[in-house]
Amino acid sequence: MGQAFGCYQVDQSNVAIKEHFGKFIDVLEPGCHCLPWCLGYQIAGSLSLRVQQLDVRCETKTKDNVFVTVVASVQYRAVSEKASDAFYRLTNTREQIQSYVFDVIRASVPKLELDSVFEQKNDIAKAVEEELEKAMSTYGFEIVQTLIVDIEPDVNVKRAMNEINAAARLRLAANEKAEAEKILQIKKAEGEAESKYLSGLGIARQRQAIVDGLRDSVLAFSENVPGTTAKDVMDMVLVTQYFDTMKEIGASSKSSSVFIPHGPGAVKDIAVQIRDGLLQATASQTN
């Protein structure tokens, strides 16, 4: 309707291409413009200056012969100063960008193994952006950003990768569990060794106290009772210990019946056996 009265409105973030009898004349900025169509002036078309996005899916093969689908996202916009080049020089901008993306990805990915493709996706995106910027700038377009948004291996390859990862994690968990059990066993053995060591020290100190007490008792008895020898005192101590032991056995609630030889001769034999054992132990320690 505006062109019927010789006026044309250009919306914000857009430019219009003005022609005179089919020849390019000017680029019209946003606003209202006088367009005397009766004198041969017309609008050939409009061009958006907004940032546009193109998602490109490219299937290629890695160095280790794994087929992957790389999804690249290209953000671009027309440059207002080169709007005429952007309007006239390209028939299909999106297909042109897609062709350059295919070319760079299929030249870069086959040089890398699958794991390296995931690790170096930023390098691939940078290579795509540099190639697009160099090629599209001559056509009046600016490449704002290029991203590799997804890398999709074949379904079977993806499943195998997940199984490998799961197996590695299970192996790590098993190693950690075994290491923990090893530490527990070592700590337990150290605790038992320390316990036995302390128990041995306690028994040794107990026996040393008993020996010291017996020695003091023998010396005191020999001094207070004239005519007695150390042998007489030891026999009496052994007999006393013998009867104390019998008393404890009889007083124990867990014992039912105990058969032991009893009588003066048995007591004498026991005293001889204990004394001989002590003498033999002392002799062995001296040697």
Image (cartoon, grey):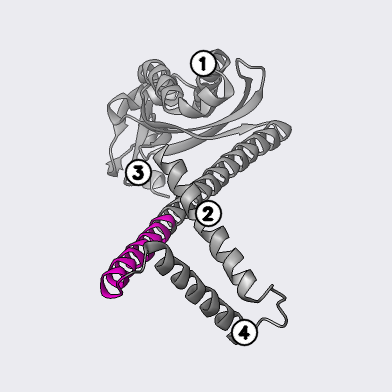
Near mark 1 (Cα within 10 A), the count class, few <14, some 14-19 or many ≥20, is some
Q: Is mark 4 on a helix, strand or loop?
A: helix
Residue at 47% in and 28% down? 119
Residue ID for mark 3: 8
Residue name at image x 38 percent, y 35 percent? 37
**Is residue 135 part of the magenta span, yes or no?**
no
- Look at label 4 and name its amino acid: Gly
Of labels 3 and 2, earlier in sequence is 3
Which is in the foreground here, disc 4 or disc 1? 4
Q: Circle 1 sits in a helix, a strand or a loop, which is it?
A: helix
User: Label 4, on which residue?
Assistant: 250
Of residues 58 and 195, the one drawn nearer to the viewer in this rendering: 195
What amino acid is labelled 2 in the image? Asp
Q: Nearer the viewer, mark 3 or mark 2?
A: 2
First-in-chain label (4 vs 1) = 1
Give the vertical position of 112 relative to 173 (above or below): above
Alpha-carbon span between mark 1 and mark 2: 95 Å
Residue visible at 65% across and 82% down in the picture = 254
Q: Residue 13's image quarter? A: top left
Residue pointed to by mark 2: 276
Residue 210's image quarter?
A: bottom left
Q: Which of 89 and 209 is in front in this view?
A: 209
Mark 3 and mark 2: Cα distance apart in space:
133 Å
Residue 221 location (% of width, % of height):
31, 72
Q: Where is residue 22 in the image (x, y as percent from the top left)?
A: 43, 23
Q: Magenta: predominant secondary structure element?
A: helix
What segment is highlighted magenta in the picture? 200-226
